[in-house]
Image (cartoon, grey):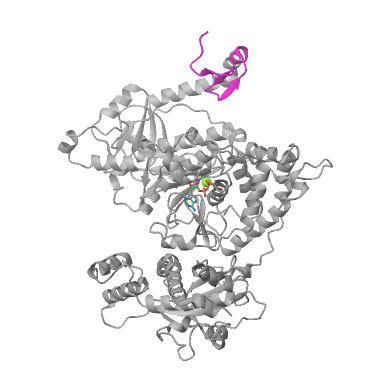
Amino acid sequence: MELEADVEPLPRGGFRCCLCMLQVANRSSLDDHLRGKKHRKLAEVRAQRKSQEEKSIFVSGFRRETSELELSDYFSSFGTICSIVMDKEKGVYAIIELQDQTVLQKVLSHPQHCMDGQKLRVKPRDKKEFKYILPKKQGSARGQELSPEKLSQALCLCSDVDEQLKQLVTLFQFSENERRLRDLLVTLLQEVFSEFFPGCEVLPFGSSVNSFEVHCCDLDLFLDLEHTKTFQANARKPQEEKQNEDKVPLDTLSEDSILSDVDLESASTSEILELIAAVLRQCVPGVHGVQALTSARLPVVKFQHKESALQGDISINNRLAFCNTRLLQLYAEVDDRVRPLVYTLRYWAKQKELAGNPFGGGPLLNNYALTLLALFFLQTRSPPVLPAVAQLKELADEGEKAIIDGWDCSFPRDSSKVEPSCNLENLRSLLAEFFHVFADFDFVSTVISLREGLALPLTDIMASETSCMLKLGALNIQDPFELSHNVAGNVSEKIALRFQNRCRDAAKYCRSLQYQRKSNKGKTWGLVRLFQRGDNTEISTTEEGPAAGDGLVIYLPSPLLVLTEVQRRNLCGTEGMQQFCFQKVCTALQFVLQDVLKCSVSLDEDDENMANAEQAVLQEEEPCVGAKRTLAEEGTSVPDSKRPRLEAESSKEERVSWHCTICHRVWLGRRKMRRELRRSAAPNLSQDVDSLQVEAEVTEAIAQQEHGSGPAQPLLTFRVSIVSTGATSQDCRTSLYFTPLQEPVALFQDFFHFLQVFLPKTVMKYIQKHTLDSPAGERESP
Ligand code: ATP
Ligand code: MG
């Protein structure tokens, strides 16, 4: 029996018509389909498109304002023109269908086309495989959204909680049509971008492909331009050099590319993204809302696709994300409890307004960070459900070893290399345990490391060469590859607190029978109640601190971390603990700002807590801007009368605001200056030289370089509010809220980015030195 070229037999019986994208159960249904209207119509459209393609040309290089008529006038001198399709905004290219092959050959053999003084680029139109795009209702992402009511109904029909977790995956994952639609869009973009960036690759990453997709999730794309750069470099070499070289293995490359105008190697990320945005706007059918976000942490071009209602993001420097997507895929394949658990947690966190950041940036956990938290939890079960990333590295073979941007990204691609876990916990208890573990997790003094599969003490991180650049935050989740990156660095303290509170509520609910057993009285049970909304308002916005709106917050590790076990035991649980931490931080911070970074610091006149603050740190005789003083060693042990008063005895917060001015760009070229100073002072500067002293010298040298010995003008003025909260060793934390007090704010942002990494390290170093050198913890305990 001979099959038509479009028909494919299916392994389990039946057939698929690849033209119409549908499956039929048997031969007679197939015959009916092939004779039917739909198949014949599509076959006809395909034949027509093919014939059009064969006699069409792709033209670019003309002026933006060129009209169809002008193009028609020019090309009709070679023969009859059937049609002209210009890109939507009539700017970049046109596809011209000629009468037949003879006219086509005539046009192509013309040595150089010129119009209006512009050289045109003319080439045969690319031959594309005909693909049928499914009608909107079946394929669009929006059509697949599930209402909370329908979800509850479906979950209540399950027989137990484990089935509910698995059902969630079935309900949220892509249908075959959705997946195909995304693939088609990727193919379309690949085709268009290849015209402009020869040899480029459009690579999907993120939830579309990491096994944790949900209907409507965005389409994250990485446009890999490495081959394009090679091509461009080669194309720019003199002719003789090129002849002596192997041919670039990019047969599809042509000179007809906007690349002739842009040097990818030297162009900035913003310039390339603007170019991508222009191509999307003008040349990709069905795309709208294109926006290049060039100043984001990860610059992207955003777009929407009308037909599928998909939101897309295109980035260009994102090989690490492409790699961590594959890691997530691997973990999902290693154990089949991973997907149900992650889907459930993602939905729960969305309902509780903990995760999602609907408009991109924001203070919530993003889905990637939440997924890492779930994977970490599974790594730390006993016995572990998943191996640590460091263990995976050992399983990678030669071809799987990879260093990306300096980070070791080696891990196996094949999940069968990973030993199955001997942990037998079911989904119901794993979910309950997740909430239980994170309800009381010590987020304040640890960093979650998926690489080690451990919660590492902050002090270890700060002492580590590779991780010490980690930006500490309210939640610290270290990226599995880029060890200096905190993937939850954006999470505000308010959200971190809400996360723990919600975990606490959920852990409590999971102990009830309503969670554990299906109701036989028709009541909601299991996951349904867990997902209920409406309890997210308990934390008032004021809890976020005085500068919550501007988001310039730095969280400092607790000074308790550097105490010895005995000192900590003496202090913990006592009323003076918070006071102790506040005082330590204030003294250390003042030293770092004043003596290390050469800022002038004074009490903020506007601060309502001035009285407290006055007693806290700045001595009465030195309250003004620019007043410098050496901190006495005993400064860490302020007498009772000078200790900051609590606002009220019952208050769980201490705060003070300072007004600061800095005259030098102390963050610019700091690393280089430090290296140079170390080199020139090599014999005297042994390892144990006070690193704070070295930092102060670095600042001095930068200041000298900038202004010589002349007077320096104030560069930046800002307010910093120091707020200590929490009364136990678990929740005791100090936040620094920064407010720039003058333009240009952009300059302040550079300074702030530097402080995010610099302050926690140096403040802790100061506290460590002045606490451990003398048995201060013991002396100071009230
Ligand atoms: P969804 O789009 O459904 O919210 P996602 O996993 O695609 O989930 P995105 O925020 O779109 O999440 O991010 C896409 C990918 O970018 C992630 O899968 C991850 O590879 C990378 N990524 C996102 N956020 C971070 C981050 N904070 N640090 C490092 N990589 C990140
Ligand atoms: Mg995404």
Q: Position of residue 485 (x, y in %)?
A: 45, 56
- Residue furthest left as drawn: 240
Q: Is residue 195 magenta?
A: no
Q: Position of residue 752 (x, y in %)?
A: 43, 68
Of the 4 image quadrants, the one containing the C terminus is: bottom right
Give residue 111's quadrant in the image. top left
The answer to whether residue 477 is above or below residue 205 is below
Q: Position of residue 35 (x, y in %)?
A: 58, 14
Q: Residue at x 41, y 35 (%)?
A: 191
Q: Is residue 143 left or right of residue 682?
A: right
Q: Nearer the viewer, residue 633 or 89?
A: 633
Q: Nearer the viewer, residue 771 or 36?
A: 771
Q: Nearer the viewer, residue 568 or 29?
A: 568
Q: Residue at x 46, y 91 (%)?
A: 621
The answer to whether residue 120 is above or below residue 779 is above
Q: Is residue 298 visible?
A: yes
- Residue furthest bottom as drawn: 621
Q: Is residue 209 visible?
A: no
- Residue furthest right as drawn: 521
Q: Nearer the viewer, residue 610 or 32?
A: 610
Q: Is residue 654 left or right of residue 205?
A: right
Give residue 29's quadrant in the image. top right
- Start-end of magenta stretch: 1-30
The answer to whether residue 636 is above or below residue 2 is below
- Residue furthest top as drawn: 1
Q: How many marks?
A: 0
Q: Position of residue 414 (x, y in %)?
A: 46, 34
Give residue 173's quadrant in the image. top right
